[in-house]
Image (cartoon, rainbow, N blue to C red):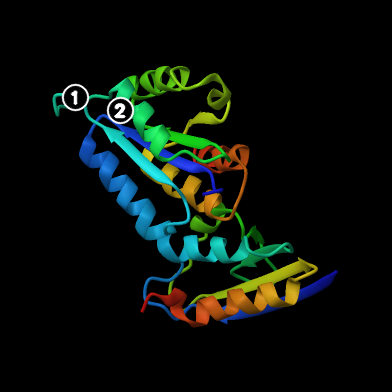
């Protein structure tokens, strides 16, 4: 079991709106690890695999998303989520 | 396809078609999706046979989650489920969720390979604040 954390700045124009939220949860669901997201390093933490909870985060452009993962593929999971955010969710 | 299928049932064919478009564009094509909207005359309403056909089109061995809008859409969906072969009936559920948002959330859950109960729970989580 590995514990992994990282953060990424939301640089896409719409922030964590509907489509980015869907992509984030879809990416998170590919991993076995527990994965959580927060807008601050000390939480509150939200389940990154829950489409409804992620949709409610409503983070704007310029916000920082913090990720933490616990499980066998924690490092790769966090790396993929950071990459998705930095790629502007492949939308721009 | 092994992911849970999604069926959208609305009184309006335009709402049903538009919601299905949203799901495809937002979630992608890894989830079987079908819709039924309007009555056989082209007006507002829902049609049991059309709903049953939509369930067939979206069929997955993992099951099918049905999203409905108002009143008759729910009762007609339940009737459509009763018309299915008995072995399939237990693998179709009607979700208590808003039709458009519920369809997107259910499809997102399905796209991750979640089982039918989890897909239904995610759609219905929208109703809890």
Q: Chain of mark 1?
A: B
**Toward the viewer: B101 or B63?**
B63
Mark 2 lies on a secondary structure that is: helix
Residue that protrudes farthest toward the right in the picture: A1
Q: Position of residue B115 (x, y in %)?
A: 62, 43
Residue at 54% in and 58% down: A54
Q: Position of residue A70 (x, y in %)?
A: 78, 67
Q: Position of residue B7 (x, y in %)?
A: 40, 38
* Mark 2–mark 1 distance (CA, rounded to whole Å): 8 Å
What crowding class fits label 1: few (fewer than 14 Cα within 10 Å), some (14-19), or many (20 or more)?
few
What crowding class fits label 2: few (fewer than 14 Cα within 10 Å), some (14-19), or many (20 or more)?
many
Sequence-wise, which precedes: disc 2 or disc 1?
1
Residue at 51% in and 49% down: B1
Tag 2 near tag 1, CB within 8 Å: yes
Mark 1 lies on a secondary structure that is: loop
Residue at 41% in and 17% down: B79
**Toward the viewer: A28 or B50?**
B50
Res A65 seen here = yes
Residue at 83% in and 73% down: A2
Res A17 seen here = no
Residue B75's place in the image compared with A19, above or below, is above
Q: Position of residue B12 (x, y in %)?
A: 23, 34
Mark 2, residue position:
B50
Mark 1, residue position:
B40
The mark tally for this picture is 2
């Amino acid at each position: 079991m590995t514990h992994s954390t990282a953060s990424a700045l939301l640089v896409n124009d719409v922030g964590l709106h509907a489509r980015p939220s869907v992509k984030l949860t879809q990416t998170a669901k590919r991993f076995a690890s527990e994965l959580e997201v927060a807008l601050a390093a000390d939480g509150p933490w939200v389940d990154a695999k829950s489409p409804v909870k992620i949709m409610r985060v409503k983070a704007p452009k310029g916000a920082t998303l913090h990720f933490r993962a616990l499980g066998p593929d924690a490092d790769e999971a966090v790396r993929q989520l950071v990459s998705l955010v930095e790629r502007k969710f492949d939308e721009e | 396809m092994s992911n849970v299928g999604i069926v959208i049932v609305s009184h309006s064919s335009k709402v049903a078609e538009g919601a299905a478009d949203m799901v495809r564009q937002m979630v992608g094509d890894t989830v079987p999706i079908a819709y039924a909207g309007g009555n056989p005359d082209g007006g507002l309403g829902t049609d049991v046979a059309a709903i049953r056909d939509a369930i067939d089109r979206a069929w997955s061995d993992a099951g099918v989650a049905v999203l409905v809008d108002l009143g008759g859409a729910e009762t007609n969906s339940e009737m459509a489920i009763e018309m299915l072969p008995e072995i399939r009936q237990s693998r179709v559920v009607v979700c208590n969720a808003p039709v458009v948002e519920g369809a997107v959330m259910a499809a997102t859950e399905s796209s991750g390979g979640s089982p039918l109960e989890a897909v239904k729970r995610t759609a219905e989580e929208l109703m809890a604040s």
